[in-house]
Image (cartoon, rainbow, N blue to C red):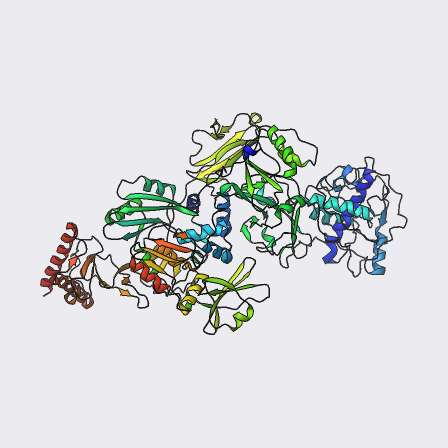
């Protein structure tokens, strides 16, 4: 009886697959007699070809060479004298439809919406049922992972699904390793649809975007036990075609998100973050793929209006108010994008969650099961607490403390902290939720901590901690770059040179991992980050200085300026070490303040009042800005402008000295430097006169 | 099982690292995208949850969603370590070059280390001779503040030996490179978002808080600052001079305060502390200037109008004057 069920499942599988594929194309691929192929040819060479009609040989039918037990269509040994389409058995009988019948129907009706009467007598002798009766074993829903049943298929309106379409569509929707079923099915019964649909969806539960967390251990896309009103599966409606007397092979069009109604199944992680005072925060973290968009609108119980991206592979945390209830009942969210792919996030409800450190998310994230040697947090309902504690004790992982989950006002959950199992446990029955607390004996090398520059490259000085999780006894000796590694009290493996620059390999009997240590950058260049900006918008005015971090850079148009100088408004004139090096700073009249700024093309040594002879020497001083000695090697300065600036340079210094302005610093070195500048000015003044 | 209950346990996550690691990572990478930054924050398992929510953080929460990533981003910008978004173009974040921001008060000078840090640089700073002295201060949601103190000449020589640029009077120079908050050339004309689902608030200059508003109020108002929120989206719009302008939220608040002639900034010249209501946190570049004096994030004090007070320490009178000028405030 089981194989009958399996056959029904395969039938429903193909119906759904063909409907999904043909819904937008509206076309029905017609069979193409593959006259070039011998009648005893094996499986289809290319599932994208039009239907190729051939005799099925046992065990050779499916493209990936799956055994005949997995392919009812291959089970028939019935030699076919004419091109035909082999059908999944209904009540153990293989039904065959001739190509001519299909073509004739299309010519008459123009479409196949009211296609062949399934009750008619089959052409050709019915095949004997497959001996093993497995048929479409893979279409059977997996235990504990059944998705919502497909709704009733309604009246058994005839539909024709061609094997090539079924195969192509089925494999589009299923995991690649699923065997392809070459069937053309008649409309399935409700039962078959339910079983097949569940099987299809159950298998596709694993087709979840875990590419971003390849090491993710948590069950992905778990389907809640109580799912609201799943979208009913629409029926296959092939579109009207023109003349179909000469069917042409069609190549499968590349699927785009807009054309596909099948939502992308993504995981919904449970994350726990410790907080101060023994509290914790529990949230849901939806997985993310680029095709869905940055901010998809989401609907479902407890869902936010839309998601916001957290990082490349995850959206930001969501904390529904009814999360304590949802963890038990399950969560299912959907998004339907106009310009983006549809998506579905699901988390199966359960009474126990095991959480561990995650590679991509900080805090603790739900995992498939406890791992020996790893630090965990366990979340369980109060009803299951005694069972959980007993199991943890058996695994050598009694909780050290409990955390308080403030949002769980009804105290529905208990949060056990510091769970670190040390012993493997034999697994319970399949589907036992407590298996999550039964660690396996498998050993695995992992890298923790460090500062990672790329996936396996670490910054020098911050190498990863090499640890062995699981049953260490089964791992044997750990070698690091061929040398036996030592393990410290914290379970971290090291060996000489393990943190040196270059590539490293860690190996044990259960596997090998590699990592690389690289130097970081040691030189950083500034740029004009903000120019006349409010922090968001910038006017990029070339005459204004720019900001980069704490660095203020001269305006772009001041090409000779080295840096920005600020001086009090009382001392705006900057004097350089060479005669003629003068620059006058200016203030900002729109700002209250006593500062002026400038961008001199030289390194200023002194800042003087603009008119030293007529300033109040009680307050005015000479400010020292640098230590450069006076340079007379460039005197006399050529040109009229140069002579003028030299004369001004001389007069300012001499005026300041005549006025008796004091220095801001009474350091002997500063005084000596000032005197040298004044002496140089006097000397040059005499020469010029 | 009661004996198992023990509150206040220290987090024992094996991979807990600090914001220092994030800065080291950013310095090694030099630049990148926002997803890379957020991934690194998660990857480095930075703690940061469970801290007291300040009014200013609530404000930021409303304005950007104060996730750990955003909090770190804002603090890194305030401290002058990195630039994000507009300041980092064409990338989404870029590490600023290492700079020693030296402020000279006459007898002693102080040099705040900001920007990129490598392990080598940090080790060299830590192993410097007694003069100048090096002080490292841990702070929440930000890298350690590293400050050199001593004579100005000694500090500059130390910077030269470390191979890092000296920025004198960073606070003054930054403030003098900024436009005043009511420079309309920076206001971008915009329109209010359509739809009835937007939650609209209006900033009250008298009560120093956001108050619920509606579309009618927005349409009929001649001068005011409005906030439109929907999920994680936020639009801050200023109605002024017959137009609608998109402005940074903190800039808009000070425009409104100016328009209502409200004084919010206080300066204690004796203690050298510049204080503002928490809800009136200055625009980010102004805040950077204030923080550059000490390298420390402002101290928060709860209570009072505006959801508490932010205190910026080590502020000279000149810096306080320039800050109040940029913010169009009269100091109290």
Relative image position of residue B270 (x, y in whole percent):
29, 55
Image: B106 above or below A3: below
Image: B247 above or below A230: below
State the residue in front, B229 or B58.
Answer: B58
Relative image position of residue A430 (x, y in whole percent):
70, 34
The answer to whether any part of residue A374 appears in the image is no
Looking at the image, residue B298 sits to the left or right of residue A249; the answer is left
The answer to whether any part of residue A627 appears in the image is yes
Relative image position of residue A552 (x, y in whole percent):
34, 57
State the residue in front, A406 or B186.
Answer: A406
At x 47%, y 41%, the residue is A452
User: Which quadrant holds the N terminus of chain A?
Assistant: top right
Relative image position of residue A625 (x, y in whole percent):
22, 55
Looking at the image, residue A519 sits to the left or right of residue A246; the answer is left
State the residue in front, A676 or B281.
Answer: B281
Image: A637 above or below B27: below
Image: A83 above or below B236: above
State the residue in front, A183 or A452.
Answer: A452
User: Which quadrant holds the C terminus of chain A?
Assistant: bottom left
Looking at the image, residue B324 sits to the left or right of residue A396; the answer is left
- Extreme residue toward the right, this view: A121
User: To which quarter of the image does residue B199 belong?
Assistant: bottom right
Looking at the image, residue A378 sits to the left or right of residue A104; the answer is left
- Extreme residue toward the bottom, this view: B242
């Amino acid at each position: 009886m089981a194989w009958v069920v399996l056959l029904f499942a395969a039938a429903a599988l193909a119906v759904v697959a063909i409907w999904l594929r043909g819904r937008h194309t509206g076309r029905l691929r017609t069979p193409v007699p593959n006259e070039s192929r011998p009648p005893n040819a094996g499986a289809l060479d290319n599932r994208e070809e039009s239907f190729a009609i051939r005799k099925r040989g046992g065990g050779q039918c499916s493209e990936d060479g799956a055994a005949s037990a997995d392919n009812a269509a291959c089970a028939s040994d019935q030699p076919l004298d004419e091109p035909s389409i082999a059908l999944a058995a209904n009540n153990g009988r293989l039904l065959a439809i001739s190509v001519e019948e299909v073509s004739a129907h299309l010519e008459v009706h123009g479409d196949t919406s009211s296609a062949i009467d399934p009750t008619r007598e089959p052409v050709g002798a019915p095949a004997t049922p497959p001996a093993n009766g497995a048929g479409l074993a893979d279409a059977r829903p997996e235990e504990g992972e059944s998705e919502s049943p497909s709704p009733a298929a309604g009246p058994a309106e005839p539909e024709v699904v061609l094997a090539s379409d079924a195969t192509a569509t089925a494999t589009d929707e299923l995991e690649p390793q699923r065997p392809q079923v070459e069937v053309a099915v008649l409309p399935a019964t409700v039962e078959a649809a339910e079983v097949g649909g569940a099987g299809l969806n159950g298998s596709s539960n694993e087709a979840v975007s875990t590419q971003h967390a390849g090491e993710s251990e948590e069950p992905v896309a778990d389907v809640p036990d109580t799912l609201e009103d799943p979208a009913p599966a629409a029926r296959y409606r092939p579109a009207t075609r023109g003349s179909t007397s000469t069917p042409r092979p069609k190549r499968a069009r590349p699927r785009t998100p807009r054309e596909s109604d099948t939502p992308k199944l993504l995981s919904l992680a449970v994350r726990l973050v410790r907080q101060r005072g023994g509290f914790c925060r529990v949230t849901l973290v939806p997985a993310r793929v680029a095709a869905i968009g940055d901010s998809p609108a989401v609907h479902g119980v407890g869902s936010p209006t839309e998601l916001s991206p957290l990082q490349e592979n995850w959206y930001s945390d969501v904390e529904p108010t009814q999360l304590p209830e949802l963890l038990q009942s399950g969560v299912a969210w959907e998004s339907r994008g106009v310009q983006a792919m549809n998506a579905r996030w699901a988390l199966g409800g359960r009474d126990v969650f095991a959480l561990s450190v995650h590679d991509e998310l900080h805090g603790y994230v739900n995992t498939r099961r406890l791992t020996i040697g790893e630090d965990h947090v366990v979340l369980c309902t109060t009803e299951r607490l005694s069972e959980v504690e007993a199991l943890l004790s058996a695994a050598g992982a009694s909780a050290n403390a409990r955390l308080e989950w403030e949002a769980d006002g009804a105290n529905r959950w208990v949060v056990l902290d510091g769970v670190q199992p040390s012993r493997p446990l034999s697994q319970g029955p399949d589907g036992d939720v407590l298996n999550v607390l039964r660690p396996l004996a498998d050993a695995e090398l992992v890298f923790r901590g460090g500062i990672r520059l790329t996936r396996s490259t670490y910054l020098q000085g911050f190498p990863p901690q090499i640890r062995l999780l699981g049953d260490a006894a089964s791992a044997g000796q750990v070698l690091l770059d061929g040398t036996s590694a030592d393990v410290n009290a914290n379970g971290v493996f090291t060996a000489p040179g393990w943190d040196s620059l270059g590539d490293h390999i860690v190996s044990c009997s259960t596997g090998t991992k590699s990592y690389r240590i690289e130097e970081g950058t040691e030189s950083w260049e500034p740029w004009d980050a903000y120019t006349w900006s409010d922090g968001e918008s910038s006017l990029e005015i070339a005459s204004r200085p720019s900001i980069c971090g704490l660095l203020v850079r001269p305006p772009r148009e001041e090409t000779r300026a080295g840096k920005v100088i600020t001086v009090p408004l009382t001392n705006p004139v900057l004097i350089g070490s060479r005669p003629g090096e003068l620059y006058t700073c200016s203030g900002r009249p729109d700002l209250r303040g006593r500062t002026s700024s400038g961008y001199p093309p030289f390194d200023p040594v002194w800042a003087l009042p603009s008119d030293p002879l007529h300033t109040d020497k009680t307050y005015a001083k000479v400010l020292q800005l640098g230590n450069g000695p006076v340079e007379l090697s460039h005197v006399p300065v050529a040109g009229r402008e140069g002579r003028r600036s030299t004369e001004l340079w001389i007069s300012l210094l001499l005026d300041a000295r005549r006025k008796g302005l004091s220095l801001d610093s009474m350091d002997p070195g500063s005084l000596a430097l000032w005197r040298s500048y004044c002496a140089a000015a006097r000397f040059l003044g005499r020469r010029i006169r | 099982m009661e004996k198992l209950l023990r509150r206040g346990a220290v987090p024992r996550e094996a991979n807990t690292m600090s914001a220092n690691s994030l800065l080291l990572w950013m310095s090694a990478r030099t630049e990148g995208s926002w997803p890379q930054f957020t991934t690194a924050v998660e990857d480095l398992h930075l703690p940061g949850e469970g801290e007291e929510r300040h009014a200013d953080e609530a404000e930021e929460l409303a304005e950007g969603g104060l996730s750990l990533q955003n909090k770190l981003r804002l603090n890194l910008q305030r401290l002058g370590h990195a630039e994000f978004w507009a300041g980092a173009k064409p990338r989404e974040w870029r590490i600023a070059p290492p700079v020693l921001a030296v402020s000279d008060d006459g007898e002693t000078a102080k040099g705040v280390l900001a920007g990129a840090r490598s392990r080598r640089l940090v080790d060299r700073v830590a192993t410097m001779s007694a003069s100048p002295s090096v002080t490292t201060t841990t702070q929440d949601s930000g890298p350690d503040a590293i400050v050199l103190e001593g004579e100005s000449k000694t500090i500059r020589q130390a910077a030269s030996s470390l191979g890092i640029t000296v920025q004198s009077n960073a606070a003054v120079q930054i403030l003098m490179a900024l436009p005043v908050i009511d420079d309309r050339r920076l206001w971008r004309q915009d329109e209010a978002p359509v739809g009835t689902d937007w939650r609209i608030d209006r900033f009250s200059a008298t009560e120093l808080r956001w108050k619920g508003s509606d579309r009618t109020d927005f349409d009929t108002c001649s001068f005011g600052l409005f906030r439109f929120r929907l999920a994680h989206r936020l639009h801050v719009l200023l109605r002024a001079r017959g137009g609608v302008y998109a402005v940074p939220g903190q800039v808009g608040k000070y425009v409104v305060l100016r328009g209502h002639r409200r004084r919010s900034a206080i300066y204690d010249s004796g203690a050298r502390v510049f204080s503002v209501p928490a809800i009136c946190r200055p625009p980010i570049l102004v805040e950077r200037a204030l923080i550059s004096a000490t390298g420390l994030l402002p101290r928060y004090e709860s209570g009072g109008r505006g959801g508490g007070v932010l205190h910026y320490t080590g502020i000279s009178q000149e810096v306080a004057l320039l800050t109040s000028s940029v913010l169009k405030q009269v100091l109290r």
